[in-house]
Image: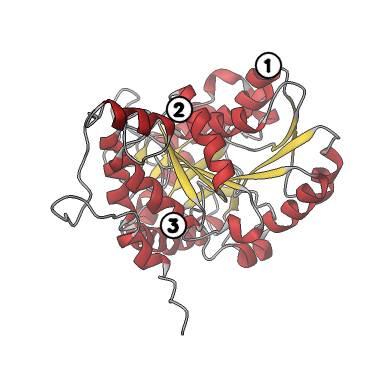
Amino acid sequence: MKPARRPSLETLAVHAGIDDHEYHPAIPPIYQTSTFAFANAEHGAALFAGREKGYIYSRMGNPTVEAAERAVAALEGGFAGLACASGMAAVHTVLATLLKQGDHVVCSDAVYGPTLTLVASIMNEWGVQSTPVDTSDLEAVRGALRPNTKVVYVETPCNPTLVVSDIAAISEIAHHHGALVVVDNTFAGPILQRPFELGADIVLHSVTKSLNGHADVVGGMIVVRDEPMYLKMRRMLNHLGGVLPPLEAFLLHRGLKTLPLRVWKSCENAQKVAEFLEGHAQVGWVRYPGLRSHPQHELAQRQMRGFGAVISFDLKGGLEAGRRMMNTVKLCLLAVSLGGVETLIQHPASMTHASMGAEARRRAHIEDGLVRLSVGIESAEDVIADLDDALSAAAGRGATRPAESHPVA
């Protein structure tokens, strides 16, 4: 008998997670309920004992949430998903499950800021040791391992430097040592990067970004390889309580249906924008994995199907030029986050990291001229025209918006 053909990612994005429900709806309904009634005392006892499948309380499981969990797990090629209230709730749940007092974690040094704070500061107070390293340097990863290293945590591409790390090589190094590999796949997503196929043990996302893609959900997702790890993670998530509500799960699942279309259009646009920026006199350097100038361009070609929506670049003129540019953009939305249908731009030194001070920003790989751009699905030519005007203003030419006004989407 010929083996069943595995659906493509494009097909899975549309159909994954949809199970049989009463009345056979095309879209899983929103079970907007906190609790579920038992048929009788025996039924309730069987559910709590795990002898029957069903629902008890939405923190412990909800049909709408499970539909989204199944869909993301199918796209990632994992065993099961666990939907969380935010990306950071997902990170916390994973690390709280895998690490205990006296354990050690190796972590990408350019990882998302709150993740590094959780690992290096908060969990350090709980007795968990950590070593941040440049995970694009395999010798640095190998050298950071200790006898008590239990987890190697990799974000690739990294935020905001867009450093690309070799998941397959890191997995081989970590597994030889007896450590698990956790990959934050937010920047690439399952359409562009397949961490499980490269050896990762756990994959997580901020689904706020491209998986939802419409700037109307805050959430996270953990995907695991097997049932034993799923049961450990589920127990921890249930007790920590950082679960995704049904309405957000519904919106996430709806967003997944157009994920491939949105991702490929954003990639196409981002490549054009990156090439424009690389040739602009007001730009010092551009970091985008799709450019030959990117230090890990060849690795990105091997490891990723596409190069993503996010571009980082250095604006000549530093802090003041960045402020002028942010006050000039009109189409690009002046906001944090990434992976949505709209193009978002931010200048950390004058916005999100302004309170840190210049020296602290440098230690965090945030230069005064660093600009992060998440390219959406608008016309690339319109985005480029808006950036061109804003770059002229950054150089001291052209008008800028008054500081108190808001960006025009």
Residue 292 locus on image (x, y percent): 63, 65
Q: Earlier in the sequence, mark 1 or mark 2?
A: 1
Q: Is residue 375 visible?
A: no
Q: Earlier in the sequence, mark 3 or mark 1?
A: 3
Kindly identify the amino acid type of the residue bearing the numbered disc 2.
Asn
* Residue neighbourhood size for the residue with mark 2, other residues' Cα within 10 Å, grouped as few (<14), some (14–19), many (≥20): some
Task: Please say if the residues under marks 1 and 2 sit with CB atoms less than 8 Å apart.
Answer: no
Which residue position holds label 2? 238
- Mark 1 and mark 2: span between their CA atoms? 21 Å
Identify the residue at horizontal 59%, vertical 56% (top origin): 196
**Secondary element at tag 2:** helix
Which is in the foreground here, disc 3 or disc 2? 2
Residue 29 locus on image (x, y percent): 20, 45
Kindly identify the amino acid type of the residue bearing the numbered disc 3.
Ala
**Secondary element at tag 3:** helix
Which residue position holds label 3? 74
- Mark 3 and mark 2: span between their CA atoms? 22 Å
Which residue position holds label 1? 126
Q: Is residue 140 visible?
A: yes
Q: Is residue 327 left or right of residue 198?
A: left
Q: Residue furthest top?
A: 125
Q: How is the image coloured?
A: secondary structure
* Residue neighbourhood size for the residue with mark 1, other residues' Cα within 10 Å, grouped as few (<14), some (14–19), many (≥20): few
Residue 133 locus on image (x, y percent): 75, 38
Near-viewer residue (203 or 383): 203
Give the position of the C terminus as an image quadrant. top left
